[in-house]
Image (cartoon, coloured by chain):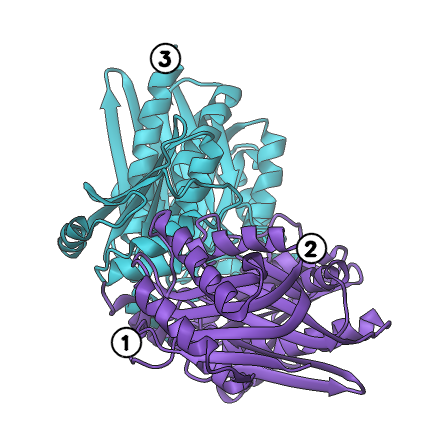
Chain colours: A purple, B cyan
């Protein structure tokens, strides 16, 4: 089954580039959607959460506008999202609750709804087959490159597109991701693998530790063929999702490096995860990596600052393959680690807690002058 | 009762300035000490936690070295702290467990213990009355100014000194604070007011959200006269402690402004506190303040990203005295807020949740280029 898309321009982006994307599914498709955990949700998120609940987990269309977050505009924003869904419902003759609405862009500015509805009309009357690159470009705001990926394993296909580069432009909300698979899964199966994958992919990346009002990640089953090996589907969806997530980190505001933090041999997975997250989101670690400085003290101090105790006389810390600390500092390894930091683009930090069997991996961008420039110099 | 101090130089600072401070109390004094919550504790912290437990809450002396954190040096560091305490115990003829050891400075370098012991000997043979400014200078690392304060209300005296400017220099650990009162309190009374005050002062400030391996805050009762109104003592100690805490924020790495975040009318104090902390530690909010940008969307997005729900259609957000958001944006107020941000040094952000009676205040520095320069350009 093909996925169709339509593109329109409502003038929401400064660039006057296309800013409305309609995705049309030819039949009801099981879908699982994870919305932002932020309590200050965009009106589009408030609308779509409710519509998705009413849909029973089967949807027919998505509409995504970029350039305006439809957030912090009062209850009018919910009405705007509803009008967008209603329009598509009429034009494509599908139930209103099977249309989900996503928005990304400036906060606090009402949508010019007449222009948006006109652009939707244009998009719906010019449907063509989904092109991942174009789709990513239409929903992008200040992304430096489009983000999409495709995977085929025997009969199984998984493909998706995304946008996101941190809250790169002031008042721009962060990430949206849409992943499709041709495998036929029901909403329950879909949502169970979706949650697990979200934790290990989009919920394990950070540009600046800030959760946006609009973040959403949808996983859609096109229902073409039955794949009984759910693990196979999960692995393929995870591979595509992780690829998209890493592209967002790579495109992170001011990023010069991707930092991969692995915490291994912990007693609990949650412990490994929270320590990895603490290291990956520490401003002191991120500035050190930016500066090419193998500052093991900052990594250890970050590792120690979760609720979980660590044994400082047992753990081992590696930067790249270099063992820099195990109850004592290794100056020679530090020298090699410094060269490694100054030449590689993807930096690996491995903390071996030497106490159990659980591990977690977290990805983050480094923190440099460009982040400050992007986030401080633009004023509303 | 007077407090005495001795100063020595062990060559731990690059500047060759005094780096050893011994504080001598003429009699046993009730003390309450709060050590870092970091699980990767400096050896001096590990030693002093144990000594304090053995002391039963009454102490006779403190020794503080700056320029070396005595951290991440293996178990040898604990032995070094013990040797420092033992030396003072012999020289001043006081029980070993009544001497507490504090260190601040570079992580991962063993203390040159012979030099440290010699400097302690010098300090102990040259005791004089405590001078707050000198004391702060001796324990400072890269602080730009000394931090001390004094308060007298009727008979009640409270005075203290501190060091800290964020982990301003790479591998430098953050804050130490010592506050004294002439009021006679037992260890139990002291620790109950100490914990409460710590939460509202040193635990409600942030430069970069990073917890150091050496942070410590001691409150010492000199036992001169009995003050039965404990609230009066608490308020005075809180006033001095908050003054010291705010000086640390003001001296925060690269700081150009102090941001005061007040969350009020919450249903729970914990909720007010976590939301205030989230706003105050958000890189996006901090860069906006640095840039003089009244970016209300970032403040609201930060407020929404704790575990506590907020009602976006009820809350009010003020920057300075300007109501910038209450279900809708006020463009005129935003213009005034922008002028306010660009002229004031202490910036007030007030989020009124309009739902209860609890409030919390949190202080933070802004985030600019200088933070990146300080933390990225120095390499180990």
Q: Is residue B279 above or below residue B132?
A: below
For label 2, the SS is helix
Q: Nearer the viewer, residue B262 or A1?
A: A1
- Residue positioned 45% across, 64% down in the render: A87
**Which chain is disc 1 placed on?**
A
Is label 3 on the same chain as label 2? Answer: no
Structural distance between the alpha carbons of marks 2 and 1: 43 Å
**Which chain is disc 3 placed on?**
B
- Residue A270: numbered disc: 2
- Residue B268: numbered disc: none
**Which chain is disc 2 placed on?**
A
Structural distance between the alpha carbons of marks 3 and 2: 48 Å
Q: Is residue A313 left or right of residue B12?
A: right
- Residue B227: numbered disc: 3
- Residue A14: numbered disc: 1
Q: Position of residue B202 (x, y in %)?
A: 40, 41
Q: Are marks 3 and 2 in contact (CB under 8 Å)?
A: no
Dot 3 surroundings within 10 Å: few (below 14), some, or many (20 or more)?
some
Structural distance between the alpha carbons of marks 1 and 3: 66 Å
Q: Nearer the viewer, residue A265 or B289?
A: B289
For label 1, the SS is loop
Q: Quadrant of the N terminus of chain B?
A: top left
Dot 2 surroundings within 10 Å: few (below 14), some, or many (20 or more)?
some
Q: Nearer the viewer, residue A74 or A9?
A: A9
Dot 1 surroundings within 10 Å: few (below 14), some, or many (20 or more)?
few
First in residue order: circle 2 vs circle 1:
1
Q: Position of residue B109 (x, y in %)?
A: 53, 66
């Amino acid at each position: 089954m093909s996925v169709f898309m339509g593109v329109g321009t409502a003038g929401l982006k400064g660039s006057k580039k296309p800013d409305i994307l309609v995705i049309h599914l030819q039949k009801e498709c099981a879908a699982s959607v994870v919305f932002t955990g932020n309590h200050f949700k965009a009106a589009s998120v408030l609308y779509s959460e409710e519509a998705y609940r009413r849909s029973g987990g089967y949807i027919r269309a998505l509409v995504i506008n970029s350039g305006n977050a439809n957030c912090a505009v009062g209850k009018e924003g919910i009405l705007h999202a509803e009008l967008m869904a209603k329009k598509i419902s009429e034009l494509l003759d599908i139930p209103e609750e099977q249309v989900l609405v996503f928005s990304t862009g400036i906060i606090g500015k009402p949508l010019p709804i007449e222009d948006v509805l006109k652009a939707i009309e244009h998009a719906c009357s010019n449907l063509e087959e989904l092109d991942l690159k174009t789709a990513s470009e239409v929903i992008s705001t200040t992304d430096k490159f489009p983000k999409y990926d495709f995977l085929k394993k025997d009969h199984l296909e998984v493909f998706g597109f995304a946008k996101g580069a941190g809250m790169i432009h002031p008042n721009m909300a962060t990430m949206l991701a849409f992943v499709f698979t041709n495998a036929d899964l029901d909403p329950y199966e879909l949502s169970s693998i979706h949650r697990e994958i979200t934790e290990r992919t989009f919920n394990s990346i950070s540009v600046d530790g800030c959760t946006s009002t609009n973040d959403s990640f949808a996983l859609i089953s096109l229902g073409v063929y039955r794949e009984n090996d759910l693990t196979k589907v999960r692995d393929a969806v995870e591979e595509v999702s992780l690829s998209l997530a890493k592209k967002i980190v790579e495109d992170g505001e001011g990023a010069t490096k991707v930092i991969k933090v692995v915490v291994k041999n912990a007693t609990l997975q949650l412990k490994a995860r929270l320590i990895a997250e603490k290291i990956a989101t520490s401003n002191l670690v991120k500035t050190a990596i930016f500066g090419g400085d193998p500052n093991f003290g900052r990594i250890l101090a970050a590792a120690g600052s979760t609720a979980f105790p660590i044994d400082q006389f047992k753990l081992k810390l590696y930067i790249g393959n270099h063992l820099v600390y195990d109850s004592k500092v290794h100056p020679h390894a530090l020298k090699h680690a410094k060269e490694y930091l100054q030449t590689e683009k993807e930096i690996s930090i491995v903390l071996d807690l030497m106490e159990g069997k659980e591990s977690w991996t977290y990805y983050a961008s480094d923190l440099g002058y460009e982040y400050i420039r992007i986030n401080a110099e633009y004023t509303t």
